[in-house]
Image (cartoon, helix red, strand yellow):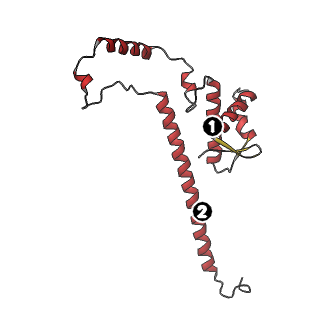
């Protein structure tokens, strides 16, 4: 290097390389933090959907006119009907169907398969991979007894809803 640059100092070069490496590590940490925040948000959203809140509860320390005065008979009849509907047993597949956000889907296997596929993709990319290929995406699902057609349908659903993106032939990344 002295022949190319007579002012070359190895110490200065080492300091420069160390600073560049620290900048790269800092970017990796920021990316990992963002992925973990997104995963936590996704898990909190799933937990929230699995345990819905009762919005009819009266908040502590807060009341309105309906809390203070009696409700007229026609409205009581409506509230009784609403309570009857609320007390009905939900369909057992409702929990799985609700895994798909903003979607009026009646296919619980699609919901579970799409969610599992998204988790598999996030785990692989979260471990440092740049993408996940089709075999890595499908093989855990096929091992669990999910058919190839269901996997294809779940992948199509994730691509259409932009929850996963195809960056090359059979190479995918989850949406950040």
Compared to residue 2, the image places residue 91 above or below, namely: above
Q: Residues within 10 Å of mark 1 (few under 14, many from 20)?
A: some
Q: Mark 1 against mark 2, which lies toward the viewer?
A: 1
- Nearer the observer, 102 or 128: 102
- Badge 1 is on which residue? 161
Residue 48 spot, x, y in % from top left: 46, 32
Element marked by disc 2: helix
Image height check: is 9 above or below 109? below
Q: Residues within 10 Å of mark 2 (few under 14, many from 20)?
A: few
Q: Residue at x 69, y 32 (%)?
A: 141
Between residue 127 and residue 34, name the one nearer to us.
34
Asked if labels 2 and 1 touch by Cβ distance under 8 angstroms, the answer is: no
- Examine the image and state in which quarter residue 66 appears: top left
Q: Earlier in the sequence, mark 1 or mark 2?
A: 2
Q: Picture coordinates of residue 37 (x, y %)?
A: 51, 46
Q: Is residue 123 left or right of residue 170?
A: left
**Residue ranking furthest to the right:** 169
Res 57 → quadrant: top left
Tell me the quadrant of the picture where the N terminus can be found: bottom right
Residue appearing at x 25%, y 31% in the figure: 62
Which label number is shown at residue 24? 2
SS label for mark 1: loop
As measured in the structure, the alpha-carbon distance from the residue carrying label 1 to the one carrying label 2 is 32 Å
Write down the quadrant of residue 95 in the picture.
top right
What is the x, y in percent for residue 20? 60, 68
């Amino acid at each position: 290097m002295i022949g190319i640059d007579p002012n070359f100092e190895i110490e200065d070069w080492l300091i420069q390389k160390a600073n560049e490496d620290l900048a790269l590590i800092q970017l990796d940490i920021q990316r990992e933090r963002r992925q973990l925040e997104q995963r936590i948000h996704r898990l909190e959203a799933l937990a929230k959907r699995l345990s819905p809140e009762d919005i009819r509860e009266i908040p502590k320390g807060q009341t309105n006119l309906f809390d203070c005065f009696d409700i007229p008979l026609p409205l009581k009849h409506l509230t009784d009907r609403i309570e009857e509907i609320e007390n009905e047993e939900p369909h057992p597949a409702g929990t799985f169907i609700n895994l798909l956000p903003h979607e009026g889907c009646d296919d619980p296997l699609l919901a579970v398969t799409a969610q599992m596929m998204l988790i598999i993709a996030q785990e692989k990319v979260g471990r440092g991979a740049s993408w996940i290929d089709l075999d890595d995406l499908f093989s855990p699902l096929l091992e669990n007894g999910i058919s190839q057609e269901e996997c294809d349908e779940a992948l199509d659903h994730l691509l259409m809803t932009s929850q996963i993106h195809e960056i090359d032939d059979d190479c995918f990344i989850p949406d950040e």
